[in-house]
Every structure is written in C-alpha cells, then in structure tokens.
Amino acid sequence: MIIALCGFMTSGKTLAGEALSEKTGRKLIDLDRYIEQQEGMDMESIFREKGEPYFRKREEECLKQIVETEDDIILSLGGGTPMNPRCAAILKERTRCFFLTCNPKVLAERMLLLQDGRPLVKNLLANHKSSTPEEKLQILEQWAKEKLHEREPIYKACSIKTIDTSVWNLDYILSHFT
C-alpha cells in the first residue's frame, strides 16, 4: 500500500515522510525530487526553462508511473499535485493519503526560511526585494491563506485523515499514521 502525504508547501510532507519511512522501513519517494531526477534538472530550472504547465504534466505522468510500479512506499507529494483532478483521482483510488495542514502564519514563516528551490515563493517575492522581512511574511501569509482556501477542500477530498503540523511535534504527527 502507498501512503501519500499531501498539503501546502512547507507543511512538513518531506520531513514527516522521512520520519515515517525510518519508522516503518518503507522506501520514501518525494514526487518533486523524482521529477527532478527524471528531468535531470532542479525544480527551479524546470519552472524557468519549461514552465509550470510542463511541470504539472510531468507531475501527473510521474505520479502514474510511481503508483503503477511501486507498492508499500511513502510518497511525499508536491503542494499542487492534488489540484490536478486526474492526480486527485489517482490519490483517492491508489493510495492512503494523509493531509498535513498548517496555520498560514506558520507556513509563511517556513516559506520565508526555506524559499530556496521553491520557484513559486521566489516569484511571489521577486517584486518585493526591498520589503522588510515582516512585510514579506505578511505577503506570504496572505498568499498561503488564499491558496489554502482554494486547496483545502481538495486536499481533504483526497485524504483519509487530516494532521495538523502547525506545532512541529514528530511523535504527535507519526502517531496519526497508525
């Protein structure tokens, strides 16, 4: 069985996936890293050189490939993966998906710290280079609120359970996968 982790960027999918992989002995596949390996370039380069529509197409193709060839793994998804209805259907039919949710302010703080390799965050902040960190935080928090409002119903529809990662407590998070 494939255990998939969905949620907004910086909600903790990769870290929770690594910990769950270690705890269960299951292989972890991070979908974004898988796509990077398939493309031979990092996420930022894919977005810059080939565009987001190309990336989303590859995301769907790679998700299909993984669920058709792998079993008994942990699959950490990109934040936008479930937004594609075909990807959402695959997740519902072929995985036990868990939605990692998080407070928008905490997401914004994490995005500000972890913006390298996140082209959507870099693009969002590109016109705000002279803004203070507090202003950037407000921009990211507002963006996270808007995106979560749009995405949360889809994340929930794909998932069997919601886990709040606003306070990072790995034992608490891992206890919800039993």
Image (cartoon, rainbow, N blue to C red):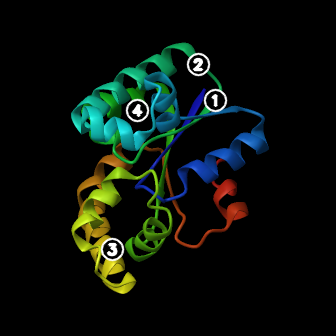
Q: Amino acid at mark 4?
A: Lys
Mark 2 neighbour class, 10 Å CA radius: few under 14, some 14 to 19, many 20 or more: some
Q: Nearer the viewer, mark 3 or mark 2?
A: 3
* Residue situated in front as seen by the camera: 11 or 95: 11
Position of residue 157 measured from the top left corner of the image (x, y, whole percent): 34, 45
Q: For mark 2, give the secondary structure.
A: loop
Label number found at residue 70: 2
Query: In terms of secondary structure, where does tag 1 sit?
Result: strand
For marks 3 and 1 on the same chain, the one whose residue lies earlier in the sequence: 1
Q: What residue is pinned by disc 4? A: 92
Residue 161 pos. (x, y %): 50, 50
- Report how many numbered discs are placed on residues in the image: 4
Where does the image place residue 56, in percent across and percent down from the top left?
Answer: 29, 33
Callout 4 secondary element = helix
- Report the mark closest to the observer, 3 or 1: 3
Q: Which mark is residue 141?
A: 3
Residue at the extreme top: 69
Nearer the observer: mark 1 or 4; the answer is: 1
